[in-house]
Image (cartoon, rainbow, N blue to C red):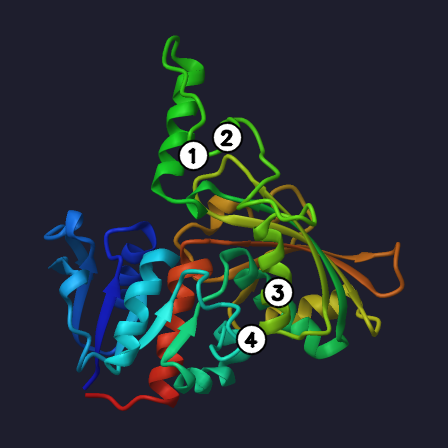
Amino acid sequence: MGYRVVVVGATGNVGKEMLNILAEREFPVDEITALASRKSLGTEVSFGDRTLKTKDLDTFDFSGWDIALFAIGSDATKIYAPKAAKQGCVVIDNSSLYRYDPDIPLIVPEVNADDVMRYKNKNIIANPNCSTAQMVVALKPLHDRARIKRVVVSTYQSVSGTGKEAIDELWNQTKGIYVPGQEVKPSVYPKQIAFNVIPHIDVFLDSGDTKEEWKMVVETKKILDPKIKVTATCVRVPVFVGHSESINIEFEDYLDWEEATDILREAPGVLVVDKREAGGYITPIDCVGEYATYISRIRQDETIENGLNIWVVSDNLRKGAALNAVQIAEVLGQRCLKKG
């Protein structure tokens, strides 16, 4: 006995990962269908050892389906998510559309799984921004022990966070630098991304922050604790997959780095790799295809009274998007929905 599951946007990077992770984690599926826009109608996608042909999202009837994992962006979600929710299917949405709605829970299962019960407000659950998801997984166990006052985070975000076109742009620009006459001008990003870093993700706000930086502030408060002060600088780097974050934390109480390490080693969803030697830390290439949020470089910050520095790395297509959505579905199934 299992659930009837829909993956919306099944031909995109995140949608494909959702299908992969549902199969890998053996999510209890009685029936599954893959939806896409009409231009991708009939495209084949993999679900474990099965091949699914995408169906038309525009004409699909969500009645009788239990869970819909959405990975289609805010504009399309605005049209189809309310339709699915009204027809009785619980929507788990990966876009930013519903994250800041006070009536819709924003969930990272390792942090605030109990909030999943609030899905009944609108039959919709929001998945957080990729950079926020991995950060709050790392912060939660430390916050429980010493109460976090302030977080200063600088991100190093891969191009896969922007989508397939950005991956292609990095690849083509990299080749173009070495092949005469094949230089590729920026189109996805405002400046060259190959062999460069761009301190600009999403649009600029009047404050001078980018919307990506604003998201990290607001989402951390909603998921973890509204009292935590957060300031972020978000940077796009020439990495295909995997987001990294340098996080400085100020606590209310003193927390020794060795105790912090012990706490993190026992935390759900976390894997500590911190040997304090050459290569004894995690980089983005090490985390691709993995479930964990990896933490390295745990050390005291002696410049403030109760400070700590950590380095956090995760596969943004997994924990930052598809994996977190599937984990929400697992919690929803365990606590709220009846099988079959």
**Residue behind mark 1:** 188
Rendering coords of residue 199 (x, y %): 62, 38
- The residues tagged by marks 2 and 1 sit, at their Cα atoms, a distance apart of 9 Å
Amino acid on which disc 4 is placed: Val
For residue 111, which numbered disc appears in the image? Answer: 4
User: Residue 96 or 336: which is nearer the viewer?
Assistant: 96
Residue drawn 56% across the image and 61% down it:
132
Could you tell which of marks 2 and 3 lies nearer the N-terminus?
2
Question: Mark 4 or 3 closer to N-term?
Answer: 4
Residue at the image position 39 percent from the left and 29 percent from the top: 171
Graded by Cα atoms within 10 Å as few (under 14), some (14 to 19) or many (20 or more), the crowding at tag 4 reads some
Count of picture labels: 4
**Mark 3, residues whose alpha carbon is within 10 Å: few (<14), some, or many (≥20)?**
some
Query: Image height check: is 22 above or below 197?
Result: below
Alpha-carbon distance for marks 2 and 3?
Answer: 27 Å
Residue named by callout 3: 218
Task: Report x, y in % for residue 163.
Answer: 38, 44
Amino acid type at image mark 3: Val
Q: Position of residue 306 (x, y in %)?
A: 85, 66
Q: CA distance from mark 4 to mark 3?
A: 15 Å
Location of residue 78 in the rendering, given as x and y in whole percent from the top left corner: 35, 64
Q: From the viewer's perspective, tell me whether residue 53 is left or right of residue 98.
A: left
**Badge 2 local density, few (<14 within 10 Å), some, or many (20+)?**
many
* Dot 1 or dot 4, earlier in sequence: 4
- Residue 262 visible, this angle: yes
Mark in the foreground, 1 or 4? 1
**Marks 1,3: beta carbons within 8 A:** no
> Could you tell me which residue is drawn at 17 percent across and 70 percent down?
32
Alpha carbon separation for disc pair 1 and 4: 33 Å
